[in-house]
Amino acid sequence: MKHTIFYLFIFALFFSCSAQTVTRKAYSTEQTTSDNSKPKLVVGIVVDQMRYDYLTRFYNKYGEGGFKRMINEGFNCKNNHFNYIPTYTGPGHASIYTGTTPKYHGIIANNWYDKVLKNWVYCAGDSTVQSLGTTDKSGQMSPHRMKTTTFADENRLFTQLRGKTIGISIKDRGAILPAGHTANAAYWFKGEDEGNWITSSFYMNELPNWVKDFNESNIVESYLKVWNTLYNIETYTESGSDLNSFEGGFKGKDTAAFPYDLTELEAQNHGLSILKSTPYGNSLITDFAIAAIKGEQLGQDNITDVLTVSFSSTDYIGHNFGVNSKEVEDSYIRLDMDLERFFNVLDAEIGKGEYTVFLTADHGAVNVPSYLKSLKIPSGYVETATIKEKLSKFMNSTFGSSELIENASNNQIFLNREKIKELNLELEDVQETIVNEIITYQHVDKAYSATTMRTVDFNSGIEELLQNGYNQKRSGDVIVVYGAAFISYHNTGSTHGSGLNYDTHVPLLFFGKGIDHGQTLLRTKITDIAPTMSALLGISFPNAATGSVLDFVINNE
């Protein structure tokens, strides 16, 4: 009996040790699999001012390796929208990567009036840092005004700073805000007579050699050539006539019509900065992004790196020529080719199936109102100077002072609170009085006070979008909304900023490692991107993220 008990004890002990060994091996295998299942590189692509219908309208002109590759191999969210106002570049880039809205991340516009400093501030401006790669102030930039983290920040924290983050765009804000606070680098383009990629001392003390080599090459100058349509202009049937009265064009050329000799036009259009307003600006971004992948050795191990790329030239072209122009169509055809070139490099350098890409936009754009008006669609232009003058007279006659309005900008009115106290007025009463007055003005569709934004919980419509864009510390006392397709802008070209579909509906494509294949017409939000990428990487969500994980996008097999 004693022998039997002894053998049973030995058997149990052996089984327990074996089970622990198996468990440890299983755990080790699971960890290795988990690490290997993550993409080596995440690439976030933002196409500045890309409306969703550019994906469908120009579809037959695209090749198989760019936009179509993302659609055919990845996941297409067809009903993706911004969920706040205003739809500008700065807030757009911040919202995509933080997973929240200006209400929390604090980037309420590109430039805004700071009611504490009593002065204008720029979303990425930072006078405490120094320029690198240029001698002027265009390099004095950082993300310090963005209050929250991006998913790139969270990846840096998760990997103990071993995972790199690099941000690239022609626009400083398009490079800086996506890359976040902990980025290894953000680079943007300085045109005019320099033509260099630059950064700030926020990131480093000296430009890397690969950036210096790029700046010393002749790549930038090589794009000073004739911009003509890639294909026969007669085949550009997805856009309007080339010669019309709805487009801006370049100084030094009588008409806004192809071709454009950039060498001849350069001197009158800010030197090398002219490239920003042509498709070659996007080609230059592609060149530099490829150089960054090689120079920084991105995606060369199992620790995920993040590369953010914002194609800015489409925005400059849209502002200049408008939504329906042949210039916009040609730009997207050429961007499609740049995307194919970029993806081919990712295949070669990182490996097919080893990287993940998402593509979206920071906002859309309205069709040129003068064009819409010619088609009898309600549209037009708002004379903000007239509104300000009329409102100033009203304030003087109602309150006995023309000094109560401190600033009016970004469709907001900032009140002089010291003056309000001096006159023994109630702030809320002054706000509501302005709301009741300005709503009677031509082309003003809605107006709300800061008190309403702060105390009423909206859950639908334009009001919800306004509330998501309202930051209590930074936004104004009264918010104004103009009618559909009524803008404060010149009579040529397009702009953006509203909460209407032409500004909110943008593409959202995912493809690569960990991404399922499919499509959806379910409404998705721009703030869903960062939580989805965080879930894919198994990292913390950005610290103020309000979006949801798009679980149907992630391949869980």
Image (spheres, rainbow, N blue to C red):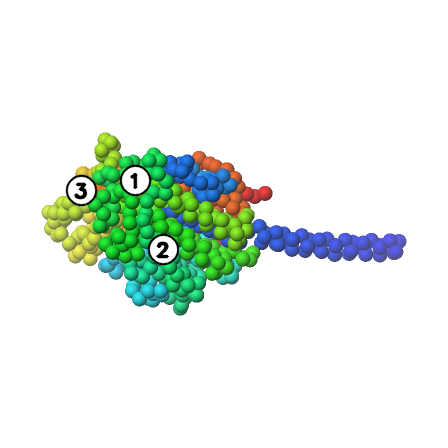
Crowd around label 2: few <14 · some 14–19 · many ≥20 (10 Å): few
The residue at which mark 3 appears reads as 437
Using the rendered view, name the quadrant where residue 334 is placed.
Answer: top left
* Vertical arrangement, residue 131 with respect to residue 430, above or below: below
Q: Which numbered disc covers residue 325?
A: 1
Residue 202 visible in this rendered orientation of the protein: no
**Quadrant assignment for the C terminus:** top right
Q: Earlier in the sequence, mark 1 or mark 2?
A: 2
| In this rendering, position of residue 473 left or right of residue 550 | left
Residue 14 appears at what percent x and percent y?
A: 78, 56
Residue 217 image point, x, y percent: 39, 61
Residue 171 vs residue 155, the one in the foreground: 171
Please, what secondary structure does the residue beneath circle 3 have?
Answer: helix
In the rendered image, the residue lying farthest to the bottom is: 205
Quadrant position of residue 56: top left
> Residue visible at 52% across and 52% down?
348
Q: Residue at x 28, y 49 (%)?
A: 261
Q: Are marks 2 and 3 in contact (CB under 8 Å)?
A: no
Amino acid on which disc 3 is placed: Glu
Q: Earlier in the sequence, mark 1 or mark 3?
A: 1
Q: Nearer the viewer, residue 129 or 28?
A: 129
Residue sitting at 54 percent across and 57 percent down?
Answer: 300
Query: Residue placed farthest to the top in the image?
Result: 376
Q: Between marks 1 and 3, how big is the CA–CA gap?
A: 39 Å
Residue type, mark 1 in image: Ser
Camera-near label (1 vs 3) is 1
Mark 2 or mark 3: which is in front? 2
Q: Residue at x 39, y 53 (%)?
A: 285
Residue 222's disc is 2
x and y percentages locating residue 408 in the rendered image: 21, 50
- Indicate the amino acid at tag 2: Ser
Question: Of the numbered discs in the image, which one, if any, rests on residue 146?
Answer: none
